[in-house]
Image (cartoon, grey):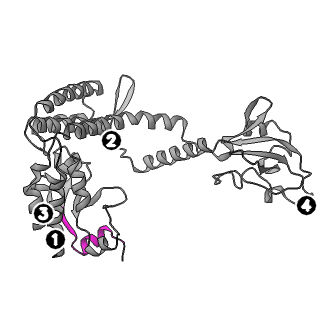
Amino acid sequence: MEELTIDILKRDNLIIFEAIAGSRAYGTNIPSSDTDIRGIFMIPLEYIIADHYVPQISDEKNDILYYELGRFLELLRNNNPNIHDLLYTPADCILINDPIMEVLIENREKFISKQCRLSYSGYAYTQIRKARGLDKKVNWEASEMKRKTVLDFCYLMIKDKTVPFKEWLMRRPMFFNNHKNYGLSKIDHARDTFAMHYIFFEPNIHNNLYGGVVSDEETANDVHLTSFSKEAPFITHLVFNKDGYSSHAKKYKEYQDWLKNHNKNRITIIDSGKPYDSKNLLHCLRLLYMAKDIADGKGIVVRRSPEECKKLIGIRMGEFGADDILTEAEELVKYIDEAFEKSDLQDDVPFSLCANILSDMRHKRYSI
């Protein structure tokens, strides 16, 4: 059974709906905007029988993403804004619309509930956090960009305190100031704590081949245990802050991925001394505009009005201060909360609705 990929979805005509998504669907695109593709596919019956279900498939950058029908309906029942966007895609952005989608599109209004109050506002607040997250990346650039090694997280127990191992090494005389001159042995019932010994070798044996607190300072992800004679002098105990190293390694990788993938053309808004990503602020306000429409009984409106698009593009281009945008967002949230309280929308989407539509579409697709 071959692994499902985007190419196979296209080859085997598994895609039942495909559309241009994102800013081009909202009407907020600018010349440098990417073209995002979103869609729905139906997994072959044999994959379901073999318990080899694949919920979604995307390219490396998530510019192209397809949801399997079952996963799509699961997210739709939860009033996921991205899923609403796809189901209510403007006609000029639809690329594939298989007739099997008819039952889903005909019933799409039944998938709107008061859960939108939390899902849309929640997504909006996520965009605010992402916008403010730029501050985190800027700070990383100043202090976290140098990759630290295991040795940076090793400490020696000297009397009643711990001393960074690398600092301790720097104060050692020649022939004693290389981590390769030391060996570690495990201590029972002591997590990440080791006995450190100085290793003596015959003059014709190079220490680098045998000793060492780590096997290789640049690539090691853990300390190195060494076999040595009983005569090797005990120096002290070494503690490896493994959790600290793991956290640093994760942050460093996250930053490197961000450097590789983030759009250098995105604009930073500086307000109250803090940097904000303008595109995230745009999405925050757009989501709240959509939530307001839903609360007011207007349904899902993906393509925003010319006036709103002008303002949202202005936000993206850095023409508005972040504080003003966030103040408007807070006012919108207050209005939305009150409007949803008065709304006659259903509290949630019935599970039976999703189950029946899924069953109907699978029966038609698989001819069973």
Task: Identify the mark nearer the N-term, 3 or 4.
Answer: 3
Q: Quadrant of residue 61?
A: bottom left
Residue drawn at x 29%, y 70% is 48
Residue 221 at x, y percent in the picture: 63, 52
For the residue pair 194 and 273, the one nearer the viewer reads as 194
Q: Please tell me whether residue 283 is drawn above or below residue 55 in the rendered image.
A: above
Q: CA distance from mark 3 to mark 4?
A: 77 Å
Q: CA distance from mark 1 to mark 2?
A: 46 Å
Residue drawn at x 14%, y 49% is 111
Residue 5 part of the magenta-drawn span: yes
Instruction: Kindly report which numbered mark, 1 or 2, lies closer to the viewer in this rendering.
Output: 1
Secondary structure under the numbered disc 2 in the rendered image: loop
Secondary structure under the numbered disc 3 in the rendered image: helix
Q: Quadrant of residue 280?
A: top left
Task: Identify the mark nearer the N-term, 1 or 2.
Answer: 2
Q: CA distance from mark 2 to mark 3?
A: 36 Å
Q: Quadrant of residue 316?
A: top left
In the picture of the structure, the residue carrying the numbered disc 4 is 204
In the picture of the structure, the residue carrying the numbered disc 3 is 101
Q: Quadrant of the C terminus?
A: bottom left
Q: Is residue 228 left or right of residue 278?
A: right
Q: Is residue 245 left or right of residue 325?
A: right
Q: Are marks 1 and 2 in contact (CB under 8 Å)?
A: no
Residue 120 at x, y percent in the picture: 23, 39
Secondary structure under the numbered disc 1 in the rendered image: helix
